[in-house]
Amino acid sequence: MYGYTLIEVGLLILAGIATGFVNVFAGGGSMFSVPALIFLGIPGPVANGTNRIAIVAQTAASVLAFKRKGFSDFKLSASLSLFTLPGAIIGAFSATKIRNSDFNVILAGVMVIVMALTFIGQKNKKALPSEGPDTSQMSTILPSRARLIWGHLAMVVLGFWGGFIQIGAGFILIPILHRIMGFDLLRTNVNKVMISFLYTVVTLVVFARELEIAWAAGLFVALGTIIGSSIAVQSHVTKGNDFVRWMINAILAVFIIKLLLFTG
């Protein structure tokens, strides 16, 4: 069991706010929440599983936000999600068997990669789309047979990565939906949040069966992610800001150094 002081609760909520904000702003927000959980004494694999509570909460909130605006693509989202599940289950189960020290090294390496992808995405004018609801029209045309086949097959890879570590899963999922499936950005986001929600629920069950999830900590982070994503959407910051991006990556660099040098 894990207990927390008021200061630690505040830090978890702040980490969640940063996670929710960055997930809308640039993607890869779990780079904040997972290290924050680790630095409060939660073993890496447990932190990896606990983080899924926040992801479920944020994606559920996003699904509801889109639904209230009249945007849903449930039948196709469900079909794609089914193909994520074998990989997600295998990935999550594999992640529960990793030693704590090995997980910290893997996490640091993934954070470096995602940081690089964030900068590359910023240089690309077709930046990562926001998770917030839009008021534009969403295409409902069924993709071609070839696009459907390749998109569903690609979901297997996405499922494994999402189940294994989740961080950066959006950098895999968005190109699948936008490039391979040919969705416009709104339809990409509608499917993205539903797919992420469905496979993350399954991975959370796997982690909960295999490890002692820190439920309270996960709920505090989840509260923060909902607040952070709301702030980002309402303030229209999704087009990005160089100063904020550099500040975010400076903080993440500190996390990486601590993961590699100062955690067991």
Image: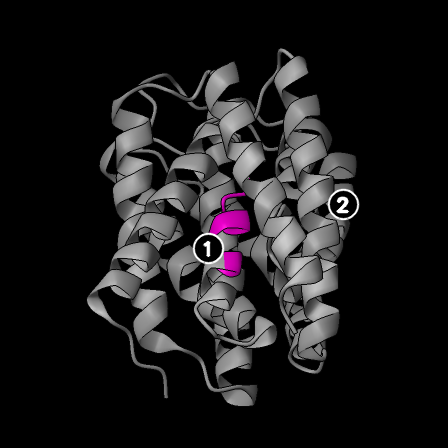
Q: Quadrant of residue 21?
A: top left
Q: Which residue is mark 2?
A: 149
Q: Quadrant of residue 263?
A: bottom right
Q: Which residue is mark 1?
A: 33
In the image, what residue occupies the spot 55% across and 22% down?
Answer: 184
Q: Secondary structure at mark 2?
A: helix
Examine the rendering and report whether any part of residue 160 can be seen: no
Q: Verify CB contact (< 8 Å) between mark 2 and mark 1.
A: no
Please provide percent x and percent y for residue 165.
64, 61
Q: Is residue 114 left or right of residue 245?
A: right
* Depth check, front residue: 186 or 117: 117
In the image, what residue occupies the spot 71% across and 80% down?
Answer: 99
* Depth check, front residue: 5 or 227: 5
Specify few, some or many for label 1: CA neighbours under 10 Å numbering under 14, 14-19, or 20 or more: many
Q: Secondary structure at mark 1?
A: helix
User: Of the residues shown, which amino acid type is indicated by label 2?
Assistant: Ile
User: Of the residues shown, which amino acid type is indicated by label 1?
Assistant: Ser
Which stretch is magenta? 28-35
Q: Quadrant of residue 103?
A: bottom right
Q: Is residue 29 magenta?
A: yes
In the image, what residue occupies the spot 30% across and 66% down?
Answer: 219
Q: Earlier in the sequence, mark 2 or mark 1?
A: 1
